[in-house]
Image (spheres, rainbow, N blue to C red):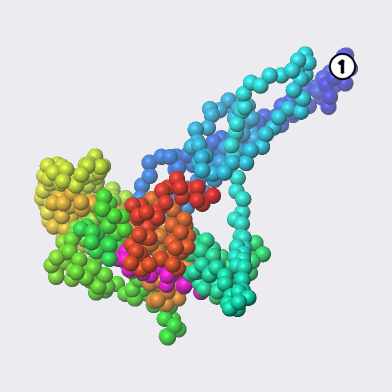
Amino acid sequence: MDISTLPVEQSPDELRQMAQWLLAELTREREKNQTLQQKIQSLEDALKTSRRWRFGRKSETFRGEERSLAEEDVDADTADLEQQLATLLPEESEKSPASPKRQPLPAEVPREEVRLDLDCHDCPECGHILRPLRDEVSERLEYIPARVVVHRTVRPHYSCPCCETVHAVPLPPQLIEKGQPGPGLLAQVTIAKACDHLPLYRQQKIYLRSGIDIPCSTLGGWFGAVGGALKPLADALRRDLRQQPVLQADETPLLLLNPEKGKSQKGYLWAYTSAAGSERNIVVYDCQPGRSGEYARAMLAGWQGTLVVDGYAGYRALFDEGGVKEAGCWAHVRRKFFEQYKASGSPVAAEALQTIRELYKLERRIKKRPPEQRRRWRQRYAKPRLAAFESWLRIKQQKTAPNSGIRKAIDYALKRWSALLAYLEDGRVPVDNNLTENRIRPVAVGRKNWLFAGSLRAGQRMADILSLLETAKSNGLEPGVWLRDVLTRLPSWPNSRLDELLPYASNPFSYSPGKQKAELT
């Protein structure tokens, strides 16, 4: 009903009818507004929850890649909710504060400039010629799919009319003689499988989308050739690892196929790293068919120093033989008390966590100090606190039930107490083994994609490749750029100079981070 069309003079029935219509229209608008307000409130509550998860305090509910995967969806949810609220409340979105300042795009990335200029430089108001004022520049990051090119090498041949000999420039040595892949393609296939966790059959489909059909067997042959070429470098990396005074070790399961039996078996990928602050940052993996301590003894044969490990008994033979000193991991101790605190709110666990928190506060303060200064600070501040903590733990040990969770956490700490105190005597020894656990995390993610290693040899080849690539990362190098450069040089490189190609930042052929970014583009 349109009010403007009603006559000026109306009867009581018409007025009553108009009042009923206005009341019904008002009710509909109120219901519509209420529904809209409920939707806005729901979106705002969801947005607050999303932001609280993303930026609020976090616990150990999720670890490592689990948290990263969860945060990806949280970020997407936040953007989705903000977009819906901007649609429902355009006025509020215009008044909202500006978004946080983002980091500038890297200067090494090539720029393609699009200039939006006026068609006419005459003022539309008065007709005078406009004068330049300023250029407003906005940048957006764009992605162009990777290009695959064919490099043709043309070698003119010449013959001598006198002696009938043929002359031509020799073909440069290649990693795969008479093969089609260049070093850049070999590096990409290797990086995609080892670092990006893409099995070869998935890579085959990716190349097929670009119109290039590379059989999976061919990709496997290329990957194997790269592994064989890099093995001398991996062996040199192991040799350098055994020259470091402080090492850290851990292990993770890796399923291995047994071609002879036609079934899988449980293998292990062992990880060894030089401690933070060492002369060289080195990561070495070792694939073995079991978890026996004999594999650790074989890897570290002849080495003497301090080894940081968790409570696994497989390393015990190393320490019993002498020459290797054991250092414990306070993160494992903290984790056991944390689990009890989250499960039952135990006040004993809470007090233990507070003491361990103080130890980590000290480590954060002295992190950048020289090793000898770290040792003195630990002796002065951490040692008395740990002496009191041990006495407190032994008292609580007598007052707790033998099979309770908190008793098991206390027993674990006291059983390894001498190893947990080892870091007090040497400033080079870290307080925990988190560095090695972080090096194992990419393997755990890749394992979900590879599912298994096709054989023990395949697992050892992957271990060699991962050792070099993860060492490159730990030294601030882009592994793809380093690998492409090494695969280009290796065919003609003398064996006596292999150490110059290792992925250390100090080596002459290691790219600086800025140069690597430019090389990638």
Up/down of 168 relative to 515, above or below:
below
What residue is pinned by disc 1?
10
The number of numbered discs placed on residues in the rendered structure image is 1
Q: Residue at x 53, y 70 (%)?
A: 170
Is label 1 in a helix, a strand or a loop? Answer: loop
Q: Position of residue 508 (x, y in %)?
A: 37, 54
Up/down of 6 relative to 467, above or below:
above
Observer-nearest of 292 and 71:
292
Q: Position of residue 158 (x, y in %)?
A: 61, 71
**Which residue is farthest front?**
162
Q: Residue at x 51, y 51 (%)?
A: 520
Up/down of 137 relative to 221, above or below:
above
Direction from residue 230 to residue 376 in the image, left or right: left
Direction from residue 27 to residue 341 in the image, left or right: left
Direction from residue 377 to residue 147 in the image, left or right: right
Q: Residue at x 76, y 20 (%)?
A: 122
Observer-nearest of 356 and 175:
175
Up/down of 37 relative to 295, above or below:
above
- In magenta segment, residue 273: no
**Which residue is farthest bottom?**
260
Observer-nearest of 384 and 48:
384
- In magenta segment, residue 224: yes
Q: Residue at x 42, y 51 (%)?
A: 511
Tell me which segment is drawn in magenta.
Answer: 218-238
Residue 520 appears anywhere in the view: yes
Q: Amino acid at mark 1?
A: Gln
Label 1 Cα crowd, 10 Å radius (few <14 / some 14-19 / many 20+): few
Q: Quadrant of the N terminus?
A: top right
